[in-house]
Image: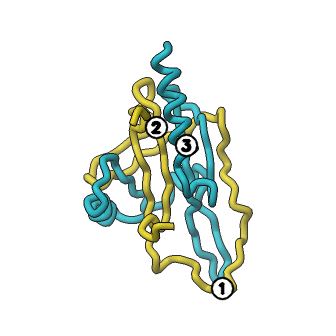
Chain colours: A cyan, B yellow
Amino acid sequence: MDSPAANAAFSKQIGLTFPLLSDMNHKMLKTYGILKGYNVQDDTYEWALRANIIVDKQGIIQFVEEGDDAVNPNTALTMCTTLHKKDGAK
Amino acid sequence: MKCTIALGLLLAAALAAAPVAPQAEKSQVAKMTLKVGDTAPDFTLLSDQWKTVKLSDYRGKKNVFLAVYVLAFTGG
């Protein structure tokens, strides 16, 4: 949701080594069903869930966790390792 | 780390847009529409380096870890 400039500043601040992507028009979030609407009094606000998604080399989703489950990435990282080992075995 | 993370997706949302009012109520059940086994819909987004990143560019090359992480600066 943040701009590339804001993401760049955040990335630099904490020293990330992977790209941070901006979905300014919420297109990806809507496609993936991650953007949700919340009613607050008379208005609706759109808000993204936290989610971890792993897509394999064939473009197939191999892992999904969302909401509170997605706060800790360790399960997803374990899945990454498993996929990596599978790739190595081929 | 022997992980095949090719890409991290972080969508830090602006705090000002947060539904902070205590009377906020969820209008929808929070559930993703995609599940394991589905083909990941393609997307093209701008990176923090202002470069276009397309999911399908990784097809046949790398596994991709997408982390949608709103409010990343909160530490929670």
Nearest to the observer: residue B68 or residue A16:
A16
Q: Same chain, marks 1 and 3?
A: no
Q: Tell me: residue A66, above or below residue B15.
A: above
Between the C-alphas of marks 3 and 2, the distance is 11 Å
Q: Residue at x 40, y 42 (%)?
A: B7
Residue B65 position within the rendered picture, expressed as x and y whole percent measured from the top left: 47, 41
Q: Nearer the viewer, residue A20 or B39?
A: A20
Quarter location, residue A75: top right
Identify residue for label 1.
B22
Q: Amino acid at mark 1?
A: Pro
The span from disc 1 to disc 3 (Cα, nearest Å) is 32 Å
- For the residue labelled by badge 2, is the local secondary structure a helix, a strand or a loop? strand
Label at residue B38: none
- Point 39% across, 37% down: residue: B1
Residue identifier under label 3: A76
Which labelled disc corresponds to residue B64? 2
Q: Look at the picture and state if B4 lies above or below A35.
A: above
What is the secondary structure assignment of the residue under circle 3? helix
Residue closest to the eye, B4 or B28: B4
Which mark is nearer the camera, 1 or 3?
3
Specify the amino acid type for callout 3.
Ala
Classify 10 Å Cα crowding around label 1: few (below 14), some (14-19), many (20 and above). Answer: few
Q: Which residue appears at 66% of the width and 52% of the height?
A: B32
**Amino acid of disc 2:** Val
